Image (tube, rainbow, N blue to C red):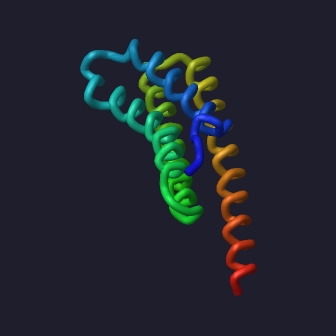
């Protein structure tokens, strides 16, 4: 069992989630159950899946939850683009949040590769 709080990617994803919550506070009330909810859910899903993967047994499950986190980060990127196009967020907020999401995705990719390499070493050692 890994402590997710010690992972840089979790810390970055948590900050992204906080930023997403802050920016969506200003969304129109009629988006409360629409885009606001979708952005918050997608953002929170990233660090939540990293945390859940850390609590699972084995690298295979950890890998699976990292992949789910990656999908949520991509979903968040789309929702941010839509929010910008609908003029719910400013260009600067869109750029900053998208840059944060991109950083998280790069960090997730790197961690996924590391987990893959560790799994491959275990497979090779047991073959």
Between 10 and 41, the one lying in front of the other is: 10
Q: Is residue 37 above or below residue 62?
A: above
Position of residue 74 in the picture relative to residue 123 (left or right):
left
Residue in front for this viewpoint, 83 or 124:
124
Q: Which quarter of the figure has residue 14?
A: top right
Report the residue at 32% width, 16% height from top.
28
| Residue occupying image coordinates x 36% and y 26% | 36
Residue 17: image x %, image y %? 50, 28
**Residue lying farthest to the front in this orientation:** 1
- Outermost residue toward the bottom? 127
Q: Nearer the viewer, residue 92 or 56?
A: 56
Residue at 58% x, 41% y: name it.
3
Instruction: Give me the residue at 44% from left, 27% from top.
Output: 83
Q: How many marks?
A: 0
Classify 71 as above or below 27: below
Residue 19 placement (x, y as % from top left):
53, 21
Question: Closest to the observer: 24 or 46?
Answer: 46
Could you tell whether 16 is left or right of 6 in the image?
Answer: left
Q: Quadrant of the C terminus?
A: bottom right
In percent of width and height, residue 75 lies at 47, 43
Q: Position of residue 60 (x, y in %)?
A: 55, 65
Left or right placement of residue 104 versus residue 38 in this view: right
């Amino acid at each position: 069992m890994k402590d997710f709080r010690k992972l840089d990617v979790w810390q970055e994803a948590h900050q992204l989630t906080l930023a997403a919550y802050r920016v969506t506070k200003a969304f129109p009330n009629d988006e409360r159950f629409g885009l606001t909810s979708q952005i918050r859910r997608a953002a929170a899903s990233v660090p939540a899946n990293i945390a859940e993967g850390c609590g699972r047994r084995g690298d295979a499950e950890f890998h699976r939850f990292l992949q789910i986190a990656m999908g949520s980060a991509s979903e968040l990127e789309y929702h941010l683009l839509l929010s910008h196009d609908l003029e719910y967020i400013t260009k600067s907020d869109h750029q900053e949040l998208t840059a944060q999401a991109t950083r998280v995705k790069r960090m997730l990719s790197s961690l996924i590769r590391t987990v893959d390499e560790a799994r491959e070493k275990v497979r090779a050692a047991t073959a």
